[in-house]
């Protein structure tokens, strides 16, 4: 995902080398001043010392600015790519994996935006460590070996304790996953919980409470251990300095000036050592985030052939389904629902009602009709001759209002509402002119009642001016008066205007307002009746 070019690596090196040399010059000067080296006790040394600090500061500012720019560029570019991928993902993928995956992918991207800093820190810290060791070796090889061995031992004990906690960390993560599930129930099911004292008691006493109790103990243990091992670096450093101050001179490995130099170097490299140790956790997080993003990219793979800007076509004449089949691929489930084979022809201007019991496949069929689901088998023919690719082209002819319609917070369509006469007329027609008093976008996107929001969606759908209108139980949320108006006035008007209407409905009182009734059962069309056949229509039972 984040690919480093040769130029980027060169830039990091170009920064890290002078930065390390400058930092090391600071130690070198301090060492010599402390040990009373006359060459370093001259007046101009303060200017040299200050110049090094200022230069080092400016170098860091310039580099950090570039690094920041680079990190944010990568982050925002990848965020845009992610949304592009989400918009192009098939509906079935979204349904199978759940929206939660998008949120975690976004979180993972944020983690990754730190990668450039971390790499730069790693390179600088490593360079500081190497130069510090070289300096110590130049002063005394055996002392440098003793100090290096002690540093390695301290780092090893840190990693061993850290890794021993991985099982506990995984268990805590599992507890937290359940916890977020309960929180979700609590927020989304707030009304249902408020209605039942038993439910409130049970969610608290049997789920949320025990989950939090178990997490509390584990969280404390993990944090306590992490706190303790983080102290290893602090107290380990004191131990190391004690060895240098007392142990090494006692063994005759270092003199007084050597001790001062060693202590100064150790104090200086303790920062980079700490960085390197702590960075291990960051790298582990990167690896996990990388794995998850890769999996996300694979699961939500973009199909390159997808046409992204469909043109509205008004030349619709007919659509024909030939042996169309579809089945939900549910892992580890034997009885997955299968739709089809569906054979059906819809002609321009027809009003078709789709009926059938719960779970008979009406919405699944609508999803195929609108190109949201890709059929596993069969052919879709539009205007008698052109066989079309349902993924990209079906939507050219259709607009749909689903049962769980959504009114966007902003206008993502090509039409404008302001000063739009047609919009004003539609508001009156849908009897929303008393609720929406002006033609401003925000007025059309306020909080509506369910029935009003469906009427607003109808206005938006009609403004799209597509020849085929698909409605999934649109009238179910309307009051009896408007429902009657919809079936008896609006549908005939839409038909007169040349629209083709395919509506899923349970309103048997209005079946006579369709040209055809198509009944689904167990994923198959079991009846396809013309409404002229009054007797058969009367006998239809859902
Ligand atoms: N995303 C999905 N994954 C797996 N199975 C699904 C999915 N969506 C629906 N189903 C199953 O497919 C079958 C048909 O569902 P569908 O929603 O098409 O029925 P419907 O006729 O619209 O029902 P209703 O009148 O209740 O809205 C049901 O058995 C349902 O459980």
Image (cartoon, helix red, strand yellow):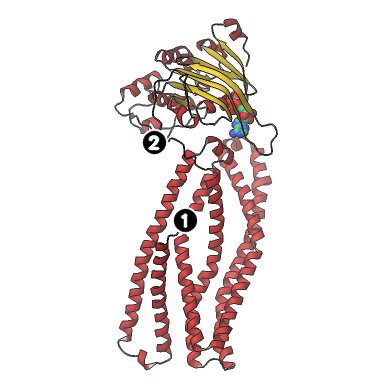
Which numbered marker is on residue 2? 1
The residue that label 2 is drawn on is: 410
| Residue found at x 57% / y 6% | 533
Mark closest to the chain's N terminus, 1 or 2:
1
Front residue of 55 and 411 = 55
Residue drawn where x is 52% and y is 66% of the image: 279
Q: Is residue 541 above or below residue 187?
A: above
Q: Report if the beta carbon of the residue with label 1 is closer than 8 angstroms to ligand 1.
A: no
Q: State which quarter of the image contains the C terminus.
A: top right
Secondary element under disc 1, as helix, strand or loop, is loop
Residue 392 location (% of width, % of height): 46, 32
Q: Is residue 383 above or below residue 181?
A: above
- Residue 497 spot, x, y in % from top left: 39, 15
Residue at figure coordinates x 58%, y 81% from the top left: 239
Q: Position of residue 350 (x, y in %)?
A: 48, 14
Nearest the viewer among 217 and 353 is 353
Q: Nearer the viewer, residue 479 or 260?
A: 260
Alpha-carbon distance for marks 1 and 2? 33 Å
Mark 1, mark 2: which one is toward the viewer?
1
Is residue 262 visible in the rendered structure shown here? no
User: Is there any visible trace of residue 31 in the rendered image?
Assistant: yes
- Residue 70 image position (x, y, % from top left): 39, 58
Label 1 crowd (10 A; few <14 / some 14-19 / many >=20): few
């Amino acid at each position: 995902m984040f690919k480093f070019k040769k130029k980027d690596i060169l830039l990091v090196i170009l920064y890290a080398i002078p930065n390390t040399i400058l930092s090391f010059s600071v130690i070198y000067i301090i060492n010599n001043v402390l040990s009373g080296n006359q060459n370093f006790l001259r007046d101009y040394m303060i200017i040299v010392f200050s110049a090094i600090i200022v230069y080092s500061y400016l170098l860091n500012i310039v580099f950090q600015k570039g690094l920041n720019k680079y990190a944010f560029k990568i982050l925002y570019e990848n965020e845009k790519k992610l949304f592009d991928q989400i918009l192009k993902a098939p509906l079935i993928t979204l349904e199978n994996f759940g929206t939660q995956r998008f949120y975690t992918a976004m979180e993972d991207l944020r983690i990754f935006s730190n990668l450039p800093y971390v790499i730069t820190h790693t390179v600088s810290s490593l360079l500081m460590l190497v130069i510090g060791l070289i300096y110590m070796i130049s002063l005394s090889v055996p002392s440098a070996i003793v100090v290096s061995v002690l540093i390695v031992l301290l780092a090893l004990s840190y990693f061993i304790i850290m890794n021993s906690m991985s099982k506990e960390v995984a268990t805590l993560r599992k507890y937290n996953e359940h916890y977020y599930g309960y929180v979700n129930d609590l927020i989304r099911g707030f009304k249902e919980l408020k209605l039942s004292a038993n439910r409130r008691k049970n969610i608290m006493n049997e789920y949320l409470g025990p989950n939090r109790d178990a997490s509390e103990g584990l969280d404390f243990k993990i944090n306590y251990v992490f706190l303790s091992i983080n102290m290893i670096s602090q107290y380990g450093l004191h131990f190391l300095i004690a060895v240098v101050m007392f142990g090494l001179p006692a063994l005759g490995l270092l003199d007084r000036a050597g001790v001062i130099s060693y202590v100064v170097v150790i104090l200086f490299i303790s920062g980079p050592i700490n960085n390197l140790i702590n960075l291990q956790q960051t790298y582990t997080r990167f690896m996990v985030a990388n794995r998850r993003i890769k999996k996300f990219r694979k699961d939500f793979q973009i199909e390159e052939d997808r046409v992204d800007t469909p043109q509205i076509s008004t030349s619709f004449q007919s659509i024909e389904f030939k042996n169309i089949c579809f089945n939900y691929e549910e892992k580890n489930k034997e009885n997955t629902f299968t739709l089809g084979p569906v054979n059906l022809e819809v002609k321009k201007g027809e009003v078709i009602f789709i009926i059938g019991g719960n779970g008979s496949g009406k919405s699944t069929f609508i999803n195929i009709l609108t190109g949201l689901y890709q059929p596993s088998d069969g052919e879709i023919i539009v205007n008698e001759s052109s066989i079309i690719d349902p993924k990209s082209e079906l939507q050219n002819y259709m607009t749909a209002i689903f049962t769980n319609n959504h009114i966007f917070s902003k206008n993502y369509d090509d039409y404008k509402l302001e000063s739009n006469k047609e919009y004003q007329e539609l508001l009156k027609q849908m009897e929303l002119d008393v609720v929406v008093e002006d033609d401003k976008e925000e007025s059309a996107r306020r909080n509506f009642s369910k029935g009003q929001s469906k009427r607003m969606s109808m206005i938006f759908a009609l403004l799209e001016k597509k020849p085929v209108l698909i409605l999934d139980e649109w009238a179910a949320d309307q009051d009896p008066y408007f429902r009657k108006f919809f079936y008896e006035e609006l549908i005939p008007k839409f038909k007169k205007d040349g629209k083709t209407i395919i509506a899923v409905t349970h309103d048997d009182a209005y079946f006579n307002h369709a040209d055809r009734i198509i009944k689904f059962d167990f994923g198959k069309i079991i009846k396809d009746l013309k409404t002229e056949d009054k007797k058969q229509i009367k006998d239809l039972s859902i």
